[in-house]
Amino acid sequence: MPEIVADNIAVINSDELEGTTRIDAEYYQPKYLRMVANILNKTQMQIKDVATLEKRKFNSNNEGEFDYIEISEISLSDGSYKPVRMPNKNAPSRAQRKLEPNDVIISTVRPIRNAVSLINKVDNVPLVCSSGFAVLKSSKLLSEYLFVWLKSKYTCALLDRLTTATMYPAVSDKDILTFPIPILSTEMQLEIQNLILKSKQLQKQSLSFYSQAKSLLLDELGIKDIDLSHEPCYEVNSADTITANRIDAEYYQPKYEKVIEAIKRYPCTPIGNMFRLVKGVEPGSSVYYDKGKPFIRVSNLNKFEINNDNQQYLPEKNYSELKANYQPLKSEILLSKDATPGIAYHLKDQIDGIISSGILRLQALSNIKREYICLVINSIVGQSQIERDSGGSVINHWKPSQVQETLIPVLPDKIQEKIELLCLESQSARRTAKGLLEEAKRKVEEMIEKGSE
């Protein structure tokens, strides 16, 4: 057995090396050896002993549609997924694996992100995932437990271990199948299943509340069914190009003006009249650490939460120097302006962290409904304006001056209040759903650590 000398030192005999493909010291860090030993004390079973690798081939044709899941469509926090519907004729080459209910999918590409999901149901069109996933099916374990195990900190560490010191972050299907897995009692598995089923029901409720809020907004503005198709030919007055200081044709697509005309049925206020904009900072990758205070980048931001996708950290010293100017405060809106511009998130809890230069802090100048503002920005109302402004450049970049001029329609207070309430109900359901998943993970992890069920 390997000898652990200190927290960062282990002695490995040559006959204990896992093949000549892994002789890097990083792979045999004591933290990994201890974790594997903990699991092996509980089980000698591997995923291949309790689950099969499914490779149902999706054969697309020129007719019909299918729902497609890529890694980006999976929530890293709760495992929910939002497939994209597309015509069969547009199927990407990666759309290869057909899914069925109770499949568990786990990403083999960029695996440290731990993109794992449990498939609930399949609608009346095929559900297909990228070839970057391993698709697992178990007849010996409840699929909810298999999902939780793959989302646990143990699997995350094993994925991290396998991808350490590699140029291209990926693992193989074989790697996944040889992961150890403890076999819980039926009673414990049923307890895990109950938590996950409740969590998934709340996820559905959360999406329903958010969808209602969005529909209410678009219905009130009269743009729920607006035609925003691309028009190949149109005319623009030269005076308009001078006013806008833009001569790229895309900027004048009629679809953008359709949205502006629709929202102007109500009073509209530019974002700059409602908020003070404060830009984040870029301290440089040389100060990134694997622990410390979170450095929040655009990839960590979505309209529902701040996630820890490939989270980077800053040392306490750097954080202390930057927090006075670059730490966001509770009740501010975080708004991305680079890479993926136009992601708006209302910060409801205080966090200790620093935001990157690709994110703006929106500090309200008056008492306004922030959830309503976020929904407007995240909807077609804001996104069409952002698409128009950031078009014509190689890298998407939304200038603060353009952010300030973005129009927000001011609906009647009663409508804003209804939208605000639906958004808050959506967030509450999402938060509770995530808490149930964390409880399920905690039960499994404690069973390993305490050695009891």
Image (tube, helix red, strand yellow):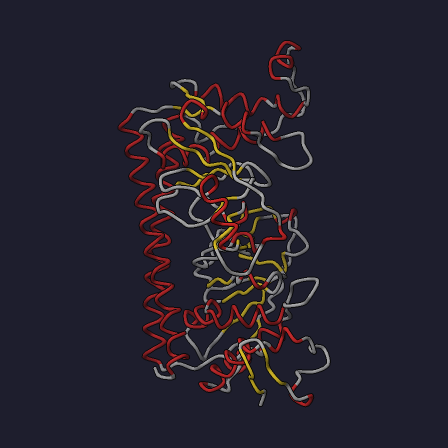
* Residue 126 visible in the snapshot: no
Vertical position of residue 256 compared to residue 78: above or below: above
Q: Nearer the viewer, residue 170 or 93?
A: 170
* Residue 88 visible in the snapshot: yes
**Residue 357, horizontal then vertical, whole percent:** 56, 40
Left/right of residue 277 with respect to residue 187 in the rendered view: right
Left/right of residue 358 with respect to residue 186 in the rendered view: right
Q: Which of 202 and 439 is in front in this view?
A: 439
Q: Nearer the viewer, residue 164 or 410?
A: 164
Residue under the image location 42 percent in, 22 percent down: 273
Screen quadrant of the N terminus: bottom right
Q: Nearer the viewer, residue 90 or 336?
A: 336
**Residue 353, horizontal then vertical, whole percent:** 46, 49
Residue 17 quadrant: bottom right
Vertical position of residue 208 compared to residue 432: above or below: above
Residue 102 quadrant: bottom left
**Residue 453, horizontal then vertical, whole percent:** 34, 82
Vertical position of residue 294 compared to residue 365: above or below: below
Residue farthest along the right direction in this orientation: 20
Vertical position of residue 171 compared to residue 48: above or below: above
Residue under the image location 54 percent in, 21 percent down: 257
**Residue 72, horizontal then vertical, whole percent:** 55, 52
Q: What number of labels is visible? A: 0
